Amino acid sequence: MVHQRVRLGILTIAHEARRVEFGYLRGQLELTAGNLSQHLTVLETAGLVEVEKGYAGRRGRTWITLTAAGNTALAEEIGRLKQLIARVDAAETGESG
């Protein structure tokens, strides 16, 4: 689930920011509101993010926070990506691994 590019991006930005606003996330990932909402629903259902709705002044806002399970899933996916990169690097230099 996390390996999907957009979802990996959501988890990464949420990890960096600790708490990220929906509009900022949408802009950074260049998604429509509907597309981002669908991805967030999947991640929230899986327990990887928490979605909080509230207000900043008079404007409705939605904030996304990474859960402990989300942090774990992100770390595991980064580990898998590092292994893949190491294999590509080894193949380019002619090393076996």
Image (cartoon, rainbow, N blue to C red):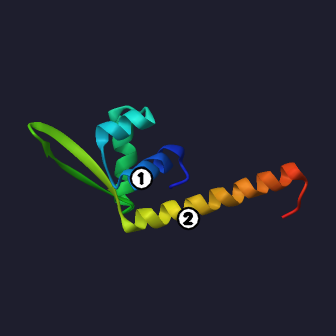
Residues under numbered marks 1 and 2 in contact, where contact means CB atoms less than 8 Å apart = no
Q: Return the residue at label 2.
A: 76
Q: Secondary structure at mark 2?
A: helix
Which of the two labelled residues, at mark 1 and mark 2, occupies the earlier sequence position? 1
User: Residue type at mark 1?
Assistant: Glu
Binning the other alpha carbons within 10 Å of mark 2 as few (below 14), some (14 to 19) or many (20 upward) gives few
| Residue that protrudes farthest toward the left in the picture | 58
34 vs 55, nearest the viewer: 55
Q: At which x and y percent is residue 73?
A: 49, 63
Q: Report the residue at 70% width, 60% height from top.
A: 83
Amino acid at circle 2: Glu
Q: What residue is shown with label 1?
A: 16
Label 1 element class: helix
Q: Position of residue 86 (x, y in %)?
A: 74, 57
Single out the mark in the foreground, 1 or 2.
Answer: 1
Residue nearest the observer in this picture, 91 or 35: 91
Label 1 vs label 2: CA separation? 16 Å
The structure residue drawn at horizontal position 14% and vertical position 42%, both measured from the top left corner, is 56
Quarter of the figure with the C terminus = bottom right
How packed is label 1: few (under 14 Cα within 10 Å), some, or many (20 or more)? few
The percent coordinates of residue 68 (x first, y second) are 38, 68
